[in-house]
Amino acid sequence: MQRGDKGKRVVRFTKRLAYIHKPDGSKFLKRWWWTYKAPVAEAVEQFQRHYKLEVDGKIGPETGHKINAVFKRQWNQRGKK
């Protein structure tokens, strides 16, 4: 996924980026998005930098897998809230 994309997949990943906390307690995104816009690309780039992935602002297989894994871990740690 990249800038300009729209739909359920964008919503799913942006909701996860809005849920995931950085070590300082802040989130990568403040809210979910329907369209992959500049704030989404910037959040993805921050996520990629933080997790030492290739920084391109796109959600490809590697970035998508890492977002899912981190989301699942934090979801379980926080008692699924």
Image (cartoon, grey):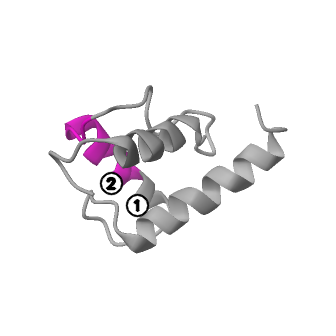
Q: Assign the magenta stretch its main secondary structure.
A: helix
39 part of magenta stretch: yes
Q: Residue at image x 43%, y 65%?
A: 63
Residue at image mark 1: 49
- Residue 57: give x, y in percent of width and height: 27, 57
Indicate whether 32 appears above or below 5.
Answer: above
Magenta residues span: 35-46
Find the distance from the CA under tag 2 to the CA under tag 1.
6 Å
Q: Amino acid at mark 1?
A: Arg
Indicate whether 13 appears above or below 51.
Answer: above
Crowding at label 2, few (<14), some or many (≥20) Cα neighbours within 10 Å? many
Q: Which numbered disc covers residue 45?
A: 2
Q: Residue at image x 60%, y 40%?
A: 21
Q: Quadrant of the N terminus?
A: bottom left
Crowding at label 1, few (<14), some or many (≥20) Cα neighbours within 10 Å? some
Indicate whether 55 appears above or below 80.
Answer: below
Q: Are marks 2 and 1 in contact (CB under 8 Å)?
A: yes
